[in-house]
Structures are given as structure tokens and as C-alpha cells.
Amino acid sequence: MRTVRASLRQFVDELDSVVFGVGFSVSLVAILVFFSSPEASANRMGQINEYLWTEFMWVYVGTMFLMVTFSLWLMFGRWGDIKLGKPDDDPEFSLLAFFSMMFSAGIAAGIVFWGPAEALAHYETVPPLIGAEAGTPAAAVGAIQYTLFHWGISYWVPYLIVALPIAYYAFRKDAPMRVSTLIAPFVGVDNLDGFWAKTIDVLAVFATIGGIATTLGFVGRQFLTGLEYTAGVSLGDAGTVLVITGLTVAFTVSVTLGVKKGIARVSLFNMAVFAGLAVATFLLGPTNYIMNTGLQAVGGYFGEFLSMSLYTNATGTGEWVGNWTVFYWAWVFSWAPFGGLFVARISKGRTIRQVVATALIGATASTIPWFLTMGGSAIFFERNDIAPMLQMVDQYGVSVSGFPLFGALPFGDGLAAVFMLLVVTFFVTSADSSTLALGMLTTGGKQHPSTINRIIWGGLMGGLASLLIVGGGIDALRSSAIITGFPFALISVVAIAGMVWEYQSVSPLLSSDPDGAVGGSNDSVGMSSPSTDDD
């Protein structure tokens, strides 16, 4: 009983009442509204979604390209030597653990859901920029090429744009670990409790809930479809809610164990299963086709990167770009607050270049083989009538695509079981990193928020994901991401301006003195250093 009282006291004492109160209240209202009128809510979300990508497509596309350009400058320019910490700070996590957590938290469930599905979708409905006839070899190459574009370098930069200023100020100047810290260059570390800071943190809560609910909805639907396809078990609405609740309990248990004991261990396990499944599929599947088509797709990705990055189909309707590229950029923008905050939390002691390179080189290099293998195999099986991939998608929905793919391979039942395991573990790592970030956001930046806080946010996100699946399906999930990601497309521009302002003062571009870039002064404002102990 004493332990319960102590936990409740910690929960109450640490709360940022404004951010938690507004974020919790609006989230609860959204759940109640969607529960009372799911169809009308889904339709309204669809209307807002269409308005945003129709009227503001240039904002999503242009902001992402700006982020990519700035991130490449950080990796290759002199500001990359700036350390995220005091001169004597060492990295808290090994490079392998750091990479695994960044990858699992950042790309997570999306790569499982869309890995076998996206290239297949583009093969059937070819991207306008590719200009090939559907179902042809040229369409296959273009389909994989565009999949790499959506999940390659560009996907990772929003996390970096949010993470780097937060980590810089938190570990060099003892600022709070929260998203509003990215405006510290303009307001100062001592003034991060004002109106604009609170507004940014509240928006970060909304974006996180929308982004993670989208992801949990995708993966929850994939898990349910897998049960139906492989075992013939079809669950109704009540069963869907129960399954999502069970998965929510799983990630809540993980996040209560802390970063080192929970998230890091699950992430390392996750990466091992992910790599093993990719290698097995590559060796057992159409290896020659994967390599030939994949290499050409990689060449197209890098050769036409600029064209794809700025493509809006201005001479057409723009619908394809809105449904795919804008959706993906908005989705990752909505993930940027919690993904960036989580990356900032684990980046202490590393240089900017190390963090950027881990994402742009390490994560992209791990992502490309997966999409080449899964997308190439799916298209090959469809083209050669080995597995009715598109027919199954028409029958079960896009979430089924991985299961007939593995069913067409040797040891298919075993691979499908591993795939289901990967669905669950990626669900866990996506959700536990987001609940940790929500905890930090709603406690004024505490790196180890209370267990009760995390459980509350975990329950809310699980509930919203369930309702989105039951009430609106994939369309509602897409709309949720595009709507909640829009504000952070704009906030990210502010973050870039702040980094330029601050990093130029630390390491002037025209200076030949590298001392400030490597370690820099502590620039301390007299606050105590953030704890690096685990939960």
C-alpha cells in the first residue's frame, strides 16, 4: 500500500499540469467522439486530410527536402564535430545498442507492415513520375525504387531535426528533455516555461498520439489479418479491441522496465529477428530476381533522388503523391516529436556526425535490403503466378501481403510464425519508446517519468488505435497521421533555424579554430546535470 501511495505521489508531483492536462483531456475527448460516432468521425478526418494534402502539399514536400539538405550538411560539415554533452561525457550506450534502439523506435512497425506491401501496390498502380505500364518489368523496378525513396534517407531526417537541438541543450546546458527545448536558441534555457514552449509540447503530445495510433493500428490490423489468413481465426470488433489491449499490456510491461532493461533488450532482440528473417527470405526466395531488379532500383533511387524529392505531380491531380509521399512525410513528422525525443535521450556523449551518420547511413543501409527482398519477392511471385499476391490483397486488405509471400517459400509456416513474432516485437518497441517520450513531455522533461504516467499514455494510445481500426480502417489511420503531422512540418523549420543560430556561435563556419566544435564549453546555466541512471 505504501508503494502504491509513493507511486501516486511521484506521478502527481512530477506532472506538468498544463501539458498533461490539455493533452490527456483532448485525447480522451477524441476517443469518446470516435467511439460514439466512428463513421462520421472517419469521414471528417478524411475531409481534413484531403484538404491538407491538396492545399499544402508543397509544405510537406519542401520541408522534407530542406531537412534532408540540412542533415547532409551536418554529416559532412564542421558542425558535425559538435559533441552532445560535456567534454568528459562518454556515450551511455554501445554503438550497437544505440543503433538498435534508434532503428526499432524510428522505423519499427511501418517496415513490417509495408515491407511486402508497398512495392506490390506501386507495381499495380505505378507512380506517375515512373511513367511505366502497370504489371511490366519497368513498373517493377519503379515500384521498388519509390519504396526505397519513401523509406530511405528522407524517412530518418525529421527525427534528427528534433533530436539534435534537444540533446545539445539537454546535455550541454542542462535544459529539460522535452520537445520545446528546440526553441531554446530564441528564448533561452531559463525561459522554456512560457506560452510558446507549452504550445509546442502540447502539439508534440497530439502529434505523438496521432502518429503512434496510426502505427499501432497498422500493426494491429496486420496481426489480426495474420490470424485470419494463417489460422482461419476471424475476430470481430470486440476481439480486435482485446488483441490491441493485449499488445498494449506487452509494451507497457516493457517500458516500465526502463531504457536499459526493457527497450534496449527488446530492440536488440528485434534486430536479430529482423535480420534473420530478411536473410532467410533472400536465400530461399527469388535471389537472382531480387538482385537484378534491386540493383537497378537502387540506381534509380540515387540517380533520381532530387526529382522524386521535389515531385508534386503539378501537371496532374496530385492524388497519388498525396496518398503516398505526403502521407509518409506527414506520418514521420507526427513521429518526429517522440522519435526525436527518444533519440535525444540516448545520444548523450556522441557527436552530431555520429548521430546523423547512424541514421542516414546505418539505418538506411539496413532498410534497403529489407525492401529489396520483400518487395522484389512479392512482385516476382505475382508476376510468375507463384502466389496470388494481389488477389489476396483484394480479399483481405493490404495488411495480408506478407503471409502469402512467406507461404510461397520453403519452410513457409515457420517463416510466417517468425514474421508474426516480428510484428509483435516491433509493435512493442514502437509503443514503449513513444510512451517514454510522452512521459517526458508531460513531466517537464524528466528522463525517467513514473510508471503510472507511462501506463496512462499506453492505455490511451491502445484505445485510440483500436477505435481507428474498428471505425475507419486504413483510411482513418492515414488521415490521422497527415493531420497530426502538419504542425511539426512547420516547427521543424524553426528547429533548423535555431540550430544554425546556435551552432554558428559555437563553431563559426569561417573560423579555422576547431576547439569549439569538438567539445565546446559547458555553457552551464547552473542546473544539475540530468541523471543517466536507468529507471
Image (tube, rainbow, N blue to C red):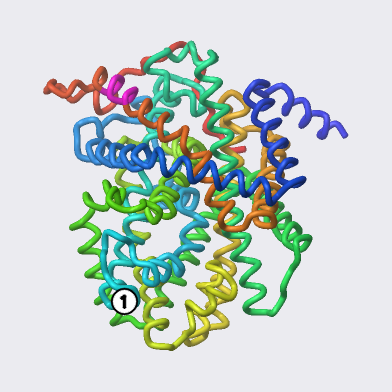
Question: Percent position (x, y) of residue 29?
Answer: 72, 35
On the image, the x and y values in percent for residue 28 come to: 72, 37
Which kind of residue does numbered mark 1 sit on? Ile
Q: Mark 1 highlights which residue?
A: 290
Q: Is residue 160 magenta?
A: no
Lateral position of residue 306 relative to residue 354, left or right: left
Q: Secondary structure at mark 1?
A: helix
Tell me which corner region of the image, top left, top right, bottom left or bottom right, holds residue 509: top left
Residues in magenta? 497-503
**Rendered location of residue 347, percent (x, y):** 42, 37
Q: Residue at x 45, y 49 (%)?
A: 327
Residue at the spot 61% in from the left edge and 55% down from the top edge: 217
The quarter of the picture where the C terminus appears is top right
424 vs 37: above or below: below
Q: Is residue 500 magenta?
A: yes
Quadrant assignment, res 425: bottom right
Residue 285 shows in the view: no
Q: Is residue 423 above or below residue 206?
A: below
Total marks shown come to 1
The single residue placed furthest to the right in the displayed view is 1
Mark 1 crowdedness (10 Å alpha carbons): few <14, some 14-19, many ≥20: many
Residue 284, can we see it? Answer: yes
SS assignment for the magenta stretch, majority: helix
Vertical placement of 242 versus 97: above or below? below
**Left-right relation of 24 to 305:** right
Q: Position of residue 367 (x, y in %)?
A: 37, 60
Q: Residue at x 30, y 60 (%)?
A: 128
In what quadrant of the picture does the N terminus appear? top right
